[in-house]
């Protein structure tokens, strides 16, 4: 009796494993990739933006934007200098890059004769993107999470998920791409990533073989990341 049961269990397990190998792979979620980090610092003194522009070569047109803009090619970061003495660093993909931008700005201003110090260097927003290896039924996801999800495809192609227990926001797209924004540290981002995985998997739909092949191409991967990053503009500072 015991031997027969053991054999039966073994056969059932083998059949289940074979079915799993034959079934389409659904719900594989790539780890989040940082697309943008927004940081702020305070120089504790007002700026004369016209004078600073002549010293360090910032772009400043008050008729178009209230801040002077300094673009740093090395760290791919843009520093926005406001007359109040506050600075916003955006565009970096690491906290180190944002810190480098602030330190570079301090050196440039001191080299121009400005007596300044930088304080309150703070991460305000981390924007990350990820992708599920499947299509997502956004309407079903919205119904299942009606108190936390907003989906209006005629206004915006993504579903906006705002969990009641946090300040982070996830944008889900039917292609499986998602954007996490609103985090101030990577621990928060990873916590939301795990929550997003639990939310999206029940509504995952298998990819067709043609779509799977298309996604595997390097061009498609780059385009997907760029679309996800472009959808996260709400994580950028308002002017």
Image (spheres, rainbow, N blue to C red):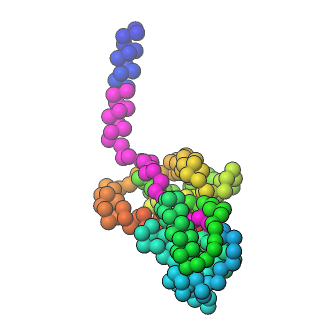
Q: Is residue 10 left or right of residue 35?
A: left
**Residue drawn at point x = 32 percent, y = 41 percent:** 22
* Badge count: 0
- The answer to whether residue 141 is visible is yes
Task: Find residue 3 and report its horizontal and vertical position in percent.
Answer: 36, 10
Camera-side residue of 198 and 166? 166
Residue 106, picture quadrant: bottom right
Instruction: Magenta stretch: give its range.
Output: 13-41
Residue 109, picture quadrant: bottom right
- The answer to whether residue 182 is visible is no
Camera-side residue of 132 and 183? 183
Q: Quadrant of the N terminus?
A: top left
**Residue drawn at point x = 56 percent, y = 60 percent:** 126
Q: Is residue 76 left or right of residue 45?
A: left
| In the image, residue 11 above or below residue 34 | above
| In the image, residue 67 above or below residue 16 | below
**Residue drawn at point x = 36 percent, y = 46 percent:** 24
Camera-side residue of 44 and 219? 44
**Residue drawn at point x = 60 percent, y = 87 percent:** 50
Q: Quadrant of the C terminus?
A: bottom right
| In the image, residue 39 above or below residue 199 | below
Q: Is residue 8 left or right of residue 49?
A: left
| In the image, residue 93 above or below residue 21 | below
- In magenta segment, residue 25: yes
Furthest residue in direction bottom, as rendered: 63
Q: Is residue 208 left or right of residue 237?
A: left
- In magenta segment, residue 64: no
Task: Find residue 147 and report its horizontal and vertical position in percent.
Answer: 69, 55
């Amino acid at each position: 009796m015991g031997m027969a049961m053991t054999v039966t269990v073994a056969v059932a397990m083998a059949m289940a494993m074979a079915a799993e190998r034959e079934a389409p792979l659904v719900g594989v979620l790539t780890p989040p990739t940082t697309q943008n980090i927004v940081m702020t610092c305070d120089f504790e003194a007002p700026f004369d933006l016209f004078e600073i522009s002549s010293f360090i070569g910032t772009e400043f047109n008050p008729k178009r934007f209230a801040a002077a803009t300094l673009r740093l090619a090395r760290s791919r970061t843009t520093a926005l200098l406001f007359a109040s003495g506050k600075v916003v660093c955006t565009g970096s993909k690491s906290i180190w890059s944002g810190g480098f931008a602030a330190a570079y700005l301090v050196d440039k201003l001191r080299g121009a004769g400005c007596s300044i110090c930088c304080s309150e260097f703070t991460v305000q927003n981390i924007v990350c993107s990820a992708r599920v290896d499947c299509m997502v039924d956004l309407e079903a996801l919205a119904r299942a999470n009606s108190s936390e999800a907003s989906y209006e495809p005629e206004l915006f192609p993504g579903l906006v998920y705002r969990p009641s227990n946090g300040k982070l926001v996830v944008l889900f797209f039917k292609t499986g791409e998602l954007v996490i924004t609103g985090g101030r540290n990577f621990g928060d981002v990873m916590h939301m990533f795990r929550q997003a995985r639990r939310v999206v998997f029940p509504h995952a739909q298998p990819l067709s073989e043609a779509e799977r092949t298309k996604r595997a191409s390097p061009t498609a991967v780059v385009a997907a990341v760029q679309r996800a990053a472009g959808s996260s503009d709400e994580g950028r500072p308002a002017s």
